[in-house]
């Protein structure tokens, strides 16, 4: 048995020793204290939920715009207003006796249970891609199958929360079979449109696509100046200016416009990182040209996407005006 804490020791923990990385600890303690020292996991999660303003705001709007209106129109409730603003509702009845209250509450409970048992978890489907209820065992199996990584960008559960949801959405007839579930990180799940039913597991496999003989599929470690999950940065072998860098997706893709959004995100992050590195080590850099040659007509010579990051310095050419317009030299200046 661990020794029991006195109220003063608990006070000392809360005020001095509790190291908070979120509001979780004090909310849980408050819930336990309010419930005579013991609360269910569900009670603690409900208490946490009540602090999540995005949830509270969502249901405040539902209350005022939908349910409050309907019940008021039926003469069952009336709004309580402060300076013309609805702040609550009052039941439109005389005082109820205790037995009346119990009977009416039981009737409400019955209606709720009956509705849920007929419609199932889909009644929460409007809350967005991950709001449809996914059972604990499905969630576990999907996460295990995905090795606890986002099936789109590869991020691990330790880095970012993973959502388990339908590949083909339920609103489009997607079944509740294991094969129709995927694990996506919060970022990828939010970026992917609700209507998009691409099987992202195929996308994940394709990140490993490499082409024999492609110089950008087989870059030696020597020139690499940066790397993330989906792309690398290398020094250009024939630099236009000092520190000329190429940002290259790992997957063999010919054309910039065939990249996945996640790859563009990865490339964009890498461009920022490389730009900062270059500025940190070379104070003479005062600007950049960022460019992509997409297609032979546009000057592409290596047919694996790469984004040029070309540092520029005051006075490196006599007339910099127009920059990338110089792809058609006679039209650079205007
Ligand atoms: P593109 O004309 O296709 O937009 O650009 C190809 C770029 O790749 C050129 O800037 C060229 O200097 C660079 N490049 C060509 N071969 C190699 C190589 O083997 N290694 C690296 N790091 N860059 C290369
Ligand atoms: Zn390649």
Image (tube, rainbow, N blue to C red):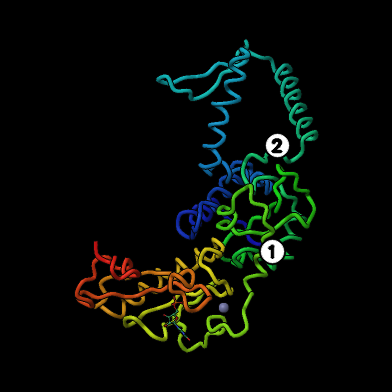
Q: Earlier in the sequence, mark 1 or mark 2?
A: 2
Asked if residue 247 is positioned above or below residue 115 in the image, the reply reads below
Residue nearest the viewer, comparing 22 with 296: 296
| Residue indicated by mark 1 | 201
Is ligand 2 closer than 8 angstroms to the Cβ of mark 1? no
Label 1 residue SS: helix
Q: Quadrant of residue 43?
A: top right
Image location of residue 181, percent across then percent down: 73, 55
Could you tell me residue 49's position as x and y percent?
58, 44
Q: Is residue 125 above or below residue 211?
A: above
Side (left or right) of 263 relative to 290: right
Front residue of 284/109: it is 284
Q: Position of residue 236 (x, y in %)?
A: 41, 82
Front label number (1 vs 2): 1
Position of residue 34 relative to residue 227, above or below, is: above
Helix, strand or loop at label 2? It is helix
Cα separation between marks 1 and 2:
28 Å
Q: Quadrant of the C terminus?
A: bottom left
**For the point 43% across and 74% down, which residue is it?**
299
The dot on residue 123 is 2
């Amino acid at each position: 048995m661990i020794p029991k804490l006195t109220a003063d020791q608990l006070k000392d923990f809360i005020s001095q020793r509790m190291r908070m990385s979120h509001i979780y600890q004090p909310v849980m303690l408050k819930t336990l204290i309010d419930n005579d020292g013991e609360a269910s996991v569900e009670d603690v999660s409900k208490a946490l939920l009540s602090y999540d303003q995005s949830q509270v705001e969502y249901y405040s709007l539902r209350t005022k715009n939908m349910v409050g209106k309907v019940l008021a129109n039926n003469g069952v409730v009336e709004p309580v207003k402060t300076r013309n603003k609805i702040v609550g509702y009052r039941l439109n009845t005389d005082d109820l006796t205790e037995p009346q209250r119990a009977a009416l509450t039981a009737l409400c409970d019955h209606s709720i249970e009956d509705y849920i048992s007929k419609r199932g978890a889909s009644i929460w489907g409007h809350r967005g891609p991950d709001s449809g209820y996914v059972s604990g065992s499905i969630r576990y199996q999907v996460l295990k199958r995905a090795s606890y990584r986002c099936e789109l960008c590869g991020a691990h559960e330790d880095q970012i929360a993973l959502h388990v949801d339908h590949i083909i959405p339920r609103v489009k007839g997607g079944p509740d079979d294991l094969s129709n579930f995927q694990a996506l990180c919060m970022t990828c799940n939010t970026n992917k449109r609700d209507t998009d039913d691409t099987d992202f597991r195929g996308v994940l496999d394709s990140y490993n696509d490499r082409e024999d003989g492609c110089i950008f599929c087989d870059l030696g470690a020597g020139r690499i100046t940066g790397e993330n999950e989906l792309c690398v940065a290398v020094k250009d072998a024939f630099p236009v200016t000092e520190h000329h860098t190429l940002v290259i997706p790992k997957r063999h893709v010919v054309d910039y416009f065939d990249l996945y959004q996640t790859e563009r995100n990865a490339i964009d992050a890498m461009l920022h990182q490389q730009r900062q590195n270059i500025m940190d080590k070379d104070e003479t850099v005062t600007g950049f040209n960022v460019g992509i040659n997409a297609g032979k007509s546009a000057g592409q010579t290596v047919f694996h996407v790469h984004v040029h990051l070309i540092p520029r310095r005051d006075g490196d050419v006599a007339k910099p005006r127009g920059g990338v317009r110089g792809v058609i030299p006679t039209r650079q200046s205007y």
